[in-house]
Amino acid sequence: MININGIINVYKEKDITSSLVVSIIKRKLKESFPNINVKVGHFGTLDPAAKGVLPIAIGKATKLFDYFIDKDKKYKVSAEFGYETDTLDATGKIIKKCSNIPKESQILDAIESFGSGYNQIPPNISAKSINGKRAYDLARQGIDFCLEPQFVRINSIKLLKFDKNLDLIISCGKGFYVRSFVKDLAIKVNSLATVIELERIQSGPFNVENSKKIDDISLKDDLIAIEDVLFDLPVFNIESKYAKKVLNGIKCKIPNAPKIFKAYVEGYFVGIGQNVEDFVNIKTWLS
C-alpha cells in the first residue's frame, strides 16, 4: 500500500498565499495518485508578502497541527524607519511619516527591553479569528475592531545590520507577529518603522536549508515520514502483553513509560503516546 502520510518542507516564495501552496500540493497529489483522497494542510500561515519555510502536512500528518504549531519559529526581517503603512509591511499604504531615525545604541537598548517576551497586539491584517471571521477580511471591508494583546515569547533577537534599514534575526514562540514587533520596537525609540522583507528561516524542526520551492518538489523524494519528523520524542515500545488494550484505546498501567513518546506496538509505529500518572494511552493515532 502506498504511504502518502508525511510532511513536505516547502519554501514559499513571495506574492503567493499559504493556501495556494496547499492547493498546488493537492493538485500534485491528484496527478500522482488519482484514486487516493487525503487531507492536506500547512503548519502556520505565512503572509503573502513573506517567504520562507512552510511545512505542508499530508494525510495523517495533518493530525500533528497542534503539536507543531507550538514549536519555535525563526525569522529574518528587514525593516525601514521613517514611515508606517496600514498593513505594517511594504504592501500597504503609507499612513504616517516621521523624520526621527534612531541610533544603533537606542535600537539595542529597545531590543533588550523586550526581555523574554511581552504583550503584543496582532496586526489587523492577520489571520486572527474574530467571531468566526478573519481579521484581514474585516479590515478590508472597513469594519472597525480591536484585537486583544497576547503574550508572545522571545528566545533571542540578533541585530545583523542597521542604517536607515534594520536587519534582525528573531527566534520566538507561537503567535508572534514580526510586523507588530517592528512597530512596537519603533515606538520604543520614538519613531516609525515598516517591514520591507520577511523570511521564515525555521519552523520547529524544518529549516530553510532543507526546504524546496514548490516547482522543485517531488512527492516521492521529498515527503518526510511522520516518524522522522518526531525525532525530538523518545521511542517507547509497548510490550505485546499490553498491545491489545492499547490498540483498543484502553489506558494501561505500563512501567517506565516517558510522559510523551513515539509509540511502537510490536515494532510498528502507531502514533504519539502519553503517560498520565503511570497510565499509558495513544494520544494521537498516526498509523
Image: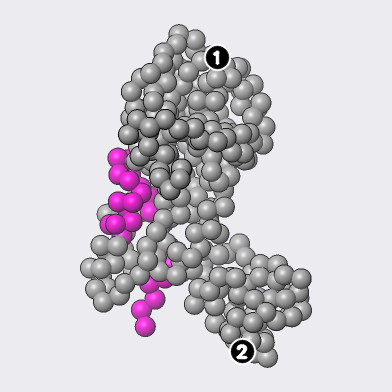
For the residues marked 2 and 1, what is the alpha-carbon distance in whole angstroms?
65 Å
Label pair 2/1, CB-CB below 8 angstroms = no
17 falls in the magenta region: yes
Q: Please report the residue visible at 39 percent of the width from the left and 41 percent of the height from the top.
A: 47
The label on residue 190 is 1
- In the picture as drawn, the residue positioned furthest to the top comes out as 99
Q: Please report the residue visible at 37 percent of the width from the left and 62 percent of the height from the top.
A: 40
The label on residue 244 is 2
Inspect this view and state whether residue 223 appears: no
Q: Please report the residue visible at 62 percent of the width from the left and 39 percent of the height from the top.
A: 151
The front one of 159 and 132 is 132
Q: Mark 2, residues whose alpha carbon is within 10 Å: few (<14), some, or many (≥20)? A: few
Q: Which residues are magenta?
A: 1-25
| Colour scheme shown | one colour
Residue 259, quarter of picture: bottom right
In the image, what residue type sits under mark 2? Lys
247 to the left or right of 115: left
Residue 280 is situated, as x and y percent measured from the top left of the image, at 69, 76
Residue 127, quarter of picture: top left
Label 1 SS: loop
Q: Mark 1, residues whose alpha carbon is within 10 Å: few (<14), some, or many (≥20)? A: few
108 falls in the magenta region: no
8 to the left or right of 166: left
Q: Please report the residue visible at 64 percent of the width from the left and 76 percent of the height from the top.
A: 281
Residue 267 is situated, as x and y percent measured from the top left of the image, at 58, 84
| Rendered view: 41 above or below 47 | below
In the image, what residue type sits under mark 1? Asn
| Rendered view: 120 above or below 163 | below
